Amino acid sequence: MIYGNLNNLGEPNTYPKIIYRLLEYLKNKDFNIMEPGKYEIEGKDIYFSVTDTKTDIIEKKKAESHVKYIDIQFSPNGGELMGFAIDEGNNEITENKLEEKDVLKYSVVENEKFIKMIPNDFFIFYPWDIHRPGCIDGEPCDIRKVVVKVKMDLI
């Protein structure tokens, strides 16, 4: 898992080349004027979705992980609490949709931590990372979410 902010990316060699290129792409696009939906960058290898949603209590948000894709979860406006943990194999899988949607869902996550996302924050989640997006920080709020999917084979 990598956590950062687009306003302070550091040197290009800090990240794999393709990841840095995508972070620059996020930095130079105004996602607040885009319609919600799915957008292709490089077909099914690299694409992103823009969604408008509401934060909710942690117990109502399922933790998840992926196998085929890396997630870059980006918050243009902040407001959500993001849960994350390294998957050490001790977490109970409650839903396995790897074939259809490349997602495993979990109820309880061992050693989970939370960070409040501020404007332009991003997380990069690899297959060994579990994440729980869209959690409430205080009162429920509307958030705009951008999730970039990068095929693991490209890294």
Image: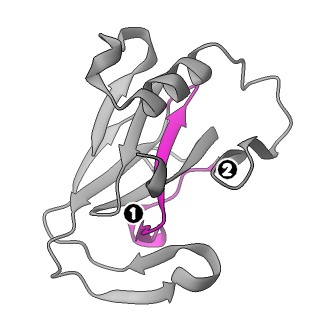
Residue type, numbered disc 1:
Ile
Which residue: 36% across, 58% down?
Answer: 131
Q: Quadrant of residue 94?
A: bottom left
Depth order, front residue of 137/110: 110
Q: Quadrant of residue 5?
A: top left
Residue type, numbered disc 2:
Thr
- Whether residue 62 is in magenta: the answer is yes
Residue 114 shown left or right of residue 147 in the figure: left
Which residue: 32% across, 54% down?
Answer: 83
Residue 128 at x, y = what percent? 27, 63
- The magenta span reads 54-78
For the residues marked 2 and 1, what is the alpha-carbon distance in whole angstroms? 15 Å
Residue 58's disc is 1
Q: Say whether residue 135 is visible.
A: no
- Tag 1 secondary structure: helix
Residue 77 shown left or right of residue 2 in the figure: right
The crowding category of the residue bearing disc 1, from other C-alpha atoms within 10 Å (few below 14, some 14 to 19, many at least 20), is: some
Q: Earlier in the sequence, mark 2 or mark 1?
A: 2
Depth order, front residue of 129/77: 129
- Tag 2 secondary structure: strand
Residue 117 at x, y = what percent? 41, 33
Q: Is residue 98 above or below residue 29?
A: below
Which residue: 59% across, 24% down?
Answer: 26
Q: Is residue 56 above or below residue 61?
A: above
State the quadrant of the C terminus. top left
Reading the image, the residue beneath label 2 is 53
Depth order, front residue of 144/3: 3
Which residue: 22% across, 59% down?
Answer: 85
Q: Quadrant of residue 29?
A: top right
Colouring scheme applied when the structure was drawn: one colour
* Outermost residue toward the right in this view: 35
